[in-house]
Image (cartoon, helix red, strand yellow):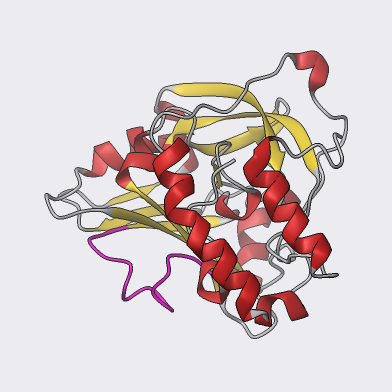
């Protein structure tokens, strides 16, 4: 584990904001801190977002590491692992009944079994997960490029965004959701991961399928994905800012 090694000035800026506010950002941890309600902090983060995206949102590539750098333990983060009856039934069947839905503004809606996902070209990357809380860890991720799945569904001409609906939920029962635009979805390092460190993804790390976006902070890498919705606008998704934490003031583009 590479604790406190969050790279780049953008990550350092976020960590500095958190420390000077004398609170920990909660995008990867316990829900609800005073910092979430700090309008000044939200304003600073929001003002920097367009610059972040314009500066490195186009062709930035996350560093890839040798196997010798893989951490022996990949730290968990985010909401608790789902414990509802539906998820327990999926784990009991080794996800045989799981279907990844891909719908919305597409010509060919999909309902993919794990065996269907495995038929797509597979890829592996060793990249670093940078949490907004200030810790980092390197892991080996395997799965299918997100764009291969989206392309198979044939997005309509007015499609602009990809929304990930997840099986985990907060204390109030609100399910996690996150989004990317189609440009980010096309990026070759953006994966639907099914394996971590050479093993099938376990429940605590987002089984059976999680998003992996190594060019952005950890809260963008949504876990326990059950549905991928292609849409033209984020305005009708919950608070309209594109994600669970974004609706509470975090940046939509969390580039590192």
Percent x, y for residue 185? 38, 41
> What is the magenta range?
230-245
Residue 38, placed above or below residue 252: below
In the rendered image, is residue 177 in sight?
A: no
Query: Magenta stretch mostly in which secondary structure?
Result: loop
Assign the N terminus to one quadrant of the image.
top right
Q: Is residue 206 left or right of residue 153?
A: right
Taking the spot 19% from the left edge, 43% from the top edge, the residue there is 154
Among the 4 quarters of the image, the one containing residue 227 = bottom left
Quarter containing the C terminus: top right
Residue 185 in the figure: left or right of residue 143: left
Question: Total of numbered circles in the picture?
Answer: 0
57 or 227, nearer to the observer: 57
The answer to whether 247 appears left or right of 54 in the picture is right
- Is 147 located above or below residue 46 in the figure? above
Task: Using the image, determine if residue 188 lies above or below residue 210.
Answer: above
Q: Nearer the viewer, residue 67 or 111?
A: 67
**In this view of the protein, can residue 61 be seen by the observer?**
yes
147 is within the stretch colored magenta: no
Q: Residue at x 73, y 28 (%)?
A: 197
x and y, in percent, of residue 215 in the image: 55, 37
Residue 148 locus on image (x, y percent): 34, 33
Q: Position of residue 33 (x, y in %)?
A: 77, 78
Q: Residue furthest left?
A: 157
Query: For residue 232: magenta?
Result: yes
């Amino acid at each position: 584990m590479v604790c406190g090694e969050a790279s780049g000035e953008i990550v350092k800026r976020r960590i500095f904001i958190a420390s000077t506010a004398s609170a920990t950002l909660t995008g990867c941890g316990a829900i609800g801190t005073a910092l979430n309600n700090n309008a000044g902090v939200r304003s600073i983060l929001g003002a920097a977002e367009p610059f972040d995206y314009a500066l490195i949102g186009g062709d930035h590539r996350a560093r890839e590491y040798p196997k010798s750098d893989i951490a022996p333990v990949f730290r968990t983060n985010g909401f608790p692992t789902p414990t509802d009856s539906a998820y327990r039934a999926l784990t009991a069947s080794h996800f045989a009944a799981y279907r990844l839905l891909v719908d919305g503004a597409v010509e060919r809606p999909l309902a993919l079994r794990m065996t269907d996902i495995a038929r797509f070209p597979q890829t592996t990357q060793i990249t670093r997960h940078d949490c907004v809380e200030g810790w980092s860890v390197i892991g080996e991720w395997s799965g299918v490029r997100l764009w291969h799945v989206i392309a198979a569904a044939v997005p309509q001409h007015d499609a602009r965004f990809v929304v990930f609906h997840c099986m985990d939920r907060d204390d109030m029962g609100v399910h996690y959701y996150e989004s990317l635009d189609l440009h980010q979805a096309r990026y070759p390092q953006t994966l639907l991961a099914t394996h971590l460190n050479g093993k099938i993804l376990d429940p605590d790390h987002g089984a059976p399928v999680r998003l992996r976006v190594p060019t952005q902070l950890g809260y963008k890498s949504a876990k326990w994905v059950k549905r991928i919705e292609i849409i033209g606008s984020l305005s009708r998704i919950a608070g309209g800012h594109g994600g669970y934490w974004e609706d509470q003031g975090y940046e939509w583009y969390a580039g590192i």
